[in-house]
């Protein structure tokens, strides 16, 4: 095609039985709606089952959203420390400076234990392993065998440092740590006996095949032995701690539980549960609810210096005895570089011994977080509710209300999870139901929109078919086409005496008449006005609205001769005023100053034009823009501006170009437009540029019926003085 007004081939006869076709479309649409609801319900059920199956998992990609929500609860609502039943005797930097570098001789540790025990704590927990003999014992020193005989005899009677330390342990209610290992070990030692009620702990507890223990002389002297090991999952955040584990088939308490057992004077601990796992752990009259695997969720609070007493202050007698008396005391190393700090859900790093102190405070304050067994059922039910609500509500809502089920469902889930945490300390996962429910919502929304689009297209086809048949019978469509094309300006008539512009334009309706429009004219001797628009829809209604819109827009531009933003806003007000059918026009309009190349433009929901500058890759002319014309009568459109180079061309198209299809339904696309434009010569005139795009569209479509009107306009600025005058 080389002219600006293409000829549309004559339309053939319609189907022999339009009513039969309409009836088949109605049946197909109802079947599609029923199938869409069935798909949505099936997806909701599948998502609910998957959520329930994942309820007890602690790691994996699917668990990240859940843990992030749990961490958010703790960050927003951390535990407030109201009482201090636990004190940490820390071997900190100050202690190392005042007493000496680590490791201290076991005699120094023995003195620390004696000093603490003298202040009458209810129990002591030693958060460390003493696996190797004290290298500072006299017997281990190189000079021992060269020392005088009487000195060696005295040291032998005195005993080595480990024996002295063990003697201090025997007089204290102290529990020492052991570490669980995943490989069997030959060493054994004393462990606290347990009673088991209606549960098989081996089926649920974290199992270790062996354990690393302190030296036998130390291990045997302690009154209690507790596991120190904690599993670290992928993100390295401590959220749960075990109260009971299994070592080589025997239930073993944690160091925290052993301290509580010593504090209440119990000789064993009790495990209670059922076929679903453990439910509680007890020492004496103290009962602690646990998860089915023997773990507990810790309710963390921020770090608190009031928990700590320096070991150096204990040794020199300056510590306040009230910090130790009748309290649980943890002894651990916190000196910089001597301990691994762990990360808590509060995004705060703290030494492991303080994490144990917080667990003990949780137990005393009855503030442990709980993830009940029915959490999975609730989360699956929430997922199902979210999905079913989407399936039932979306087909019945108007387009503007479609997001509301998702918004209401999201707010309900977040509020429910936060409320249960705040008031009941329950950890309910609302992230996974939200993600699963949102997935169902998106699928159902796509099906609803597809169904609505099918109905719209069916209705549009019926209307167009009936009106086309009537118009063909009366010869009206042909007349309408001639009239419509006649009101469009011919690009070759747009000239500038100084030769500063080169323009080309064409419109090819998809039907006898179409809804695309364009206009181009000189506002004055130095300003060129141009616009391209696309009415929503095709056929006679679109063509009538096209004629109305073009006339109103041109009259507004000629009347105002103002900035493009003002023209666009006023034209929109005029078009919206008499828009009883609620049609709208996407439009791009601009004013080019032929003296400077300054382009001011405004976009009302139209595809961004393509700027073809010399020696540069084609690029879209983006901007803020606004909604299509005719929707809101009070819209104020923002103006944009750009300075284009001499020889640059602006290519404006409608979506009939990008949505041109092959017989197989493959779209032409915006990327192909830019690719074809990039292949044009820098000095190509406007008509050549237009024909390059149009010819490629026709070649690509391979004779397929166009899906929409095709409009192309090319405005090329040659420069302020192209003739060199």
Image (cartoon, grey):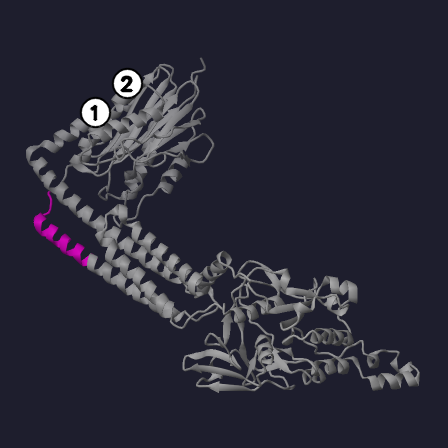
- Decide: few, some or many residues near mark 1? Use Cα within 10 Å; few <14, some 14-19, many ≥20: some
Q: Look at the numbered disc 1 and give the secondary structure of its residue.
A: loop
Residue 20 in the magenta stretch? The answer is yes
Q: Which residue is mark 1?
A: 487
Whether residue 219 can be seen here: yes
Q: Residue furthest right?
A: 148
Of labels 1 and 2, the one closer to you: 2
Q: Which residue is mark 2?
A: 559
Query: Is 490 situated left or right of 118 in this image?
Result: left
Q: At 33% from the left edge and 22% from the top edge, which residue is drawn?
A: 529
Q: Quadrant of the N terminus?
A: top left
Q: With respect to residue 518, does 315 lie above or below?
A: below
Please report the bounds of the magenta region as a residue range.
13-32
Q: At 36% from the left edge and 61% from the top edge, which residue is drawn?
A: 436
* Relative image position of residue 603 (x, y in whole percent): 34, 32
Q: With respect to residue 633, does 330 lie above or below?
A: below
- Distance of label 1 from label 2 (alpha carbons): 19 Å
Kindly indicate whether the residue at mark 2 contacts the one at mark 1 (C-beta within 8 angstroms).
no
- What main secondary structure does the magenta stretch of the protein show? helix
Residue 250 badge: none
Q: Residue furthest top?
A: 725
How many marks the image carries: the answer is 2
Q: Look at the numbered disc 2 and give the secondary structure of its residue.
A: helix
């Amino acid at each position: 095609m080389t002219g600006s007004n293409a000829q549309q081939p004559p339309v053939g006869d319609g189907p022999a039985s339009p009513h039969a076709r309409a009836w088949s479309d109605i049946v197909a649409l109802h079947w599609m709606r029923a199938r869409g609801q069935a798909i949505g319900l099936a997806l909701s059920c599948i998502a609910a089952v998957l959520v329930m199956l994942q309820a007890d998992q602690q790691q994996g990609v699917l668990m990240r959203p859940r843990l992030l929500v749990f961490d958010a609860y703790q960050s927003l609502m951390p535990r407030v420390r109201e009482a201090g039943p636990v004190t940490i005797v820390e071997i900190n930097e100050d202690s190392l400076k005042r007493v000496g570098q680590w490791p201290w001789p076991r005699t120094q540790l023995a003195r620390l234990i004696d000093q603490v025990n003298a202040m009458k704590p209810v129990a002591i927990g030693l958060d460390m392993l003493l696996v190797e003999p004290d290298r500072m014992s006299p017997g281990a020193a190189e000079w021992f065998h060269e020392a005088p005989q009487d000195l060696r005899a005295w040291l032998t009677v005195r005993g080595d440092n480990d024996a002295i330390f063990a003697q201090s342990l025997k007089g204290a209610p102290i529990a020492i740590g052991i570490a669980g290992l995943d490989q069997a070990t030959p060493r054994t030692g004393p462990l606290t006996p347990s009673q088991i009620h209606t549960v098989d702990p081996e089926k649920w507890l974290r199992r270790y095949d062996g354990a690393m223990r302190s030296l036998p002389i130390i291990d045997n002297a302690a009154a209690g032995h507790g596991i120190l090991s904690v599993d670290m999952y992928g993100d390295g955040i401590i959220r749960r701690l075990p109260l009971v584990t299994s070592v080589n088939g025997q239930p073993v308490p944690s160091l925290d539980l052993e301290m509580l057992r010593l504090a209440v004077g119990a000789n064993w601990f009790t495990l209670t549960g059922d076929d679903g796992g453990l439910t509680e752990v007890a020492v004496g009259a103290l009962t602690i609810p646990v998860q089915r695997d023997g773990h507990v969720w810790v309710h963390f609070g921020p770090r608190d210096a009031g928990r700590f007493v320096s070991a150096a202050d204990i040794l020199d007698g300056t510590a306040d005895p009230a910090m130790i008396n009748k309290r649980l005391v943890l002894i651990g190393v916190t000196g910089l570089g001597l301990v691994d700090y762990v990360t808590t859900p509060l995004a705060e790093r703290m030494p492991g011994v303080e994490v144990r102190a917080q667990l003990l405070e949780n137990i005393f304050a009855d503030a442990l977080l709980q993830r009940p067994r029915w959490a999975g059922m609730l989360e699956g039910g929430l997922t199902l509710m979210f999905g079913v609500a989407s399936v039932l509500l979306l087909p019945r809502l108007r387009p503007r209300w479609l997001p509301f089920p998702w918004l209401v469902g999201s707010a309900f889930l977040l509020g429910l999870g936060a409320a249960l945490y705040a008031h009941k300390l329950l950890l309910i996962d609302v992230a996974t139901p939200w993600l699963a429910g949102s997935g169902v919502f998106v699928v159902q929304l796509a099906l609803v929109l597809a169904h609505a689009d099918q109905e719209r297209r069916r209705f549009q086809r019926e209307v167009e078919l009936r009106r086309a048949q009537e118009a063909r019978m009366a010869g009206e469509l042909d007349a309408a086409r001639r009239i419509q094309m006649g009101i469009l300006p011919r690009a070759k008539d747009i000239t500038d005496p100084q030769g500063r512009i080169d323009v080309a334009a064409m419109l090819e309706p998809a039907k006898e008449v179409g809804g695309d429009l364009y206009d181009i004219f000189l506002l004055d001797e130095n300003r060129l006005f141009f616009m391209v628009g696309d009415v929503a829809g095709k056929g006679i209604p679109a063509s009538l609205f096209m004629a109305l819109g073009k006339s109103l827009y041109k009259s507004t531009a000629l009347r105002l001769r103002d900035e493009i933003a003002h023209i666009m806003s006023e034209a929109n007000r005029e078009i919206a005023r008499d828009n009883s059918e609620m049609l709208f026009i996407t439009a791009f309009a601009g004013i080019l100053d032929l003296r400077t190349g300054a382009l001011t433009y405004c976009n009302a929901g139209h595809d961004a034009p393509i700027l073809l500058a010399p020696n540069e890759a084609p690029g879209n002319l983006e901007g803020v823009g606004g909604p299509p014309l005719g929707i809101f009568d009070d819209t104020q459109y923002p103006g944009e501006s750009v300075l284009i180079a001499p020889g640059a061309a602006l290519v404006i198209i409608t979506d009939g170009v990008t949505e041109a299809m092959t017989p197989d339904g493959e779209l032409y696309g915006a990327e192909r437009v830019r690719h074809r434009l990039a292949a044009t010569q820098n000095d190509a005139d406007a008509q050549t540029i237009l024909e390059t795009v149009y010819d490629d569209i026709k070649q690509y479509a391979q004779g397929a019926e166009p899906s929409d009107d095709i409009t192309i306009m090319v405005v090329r600025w040659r420069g302020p003085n192209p003739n060199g005058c």
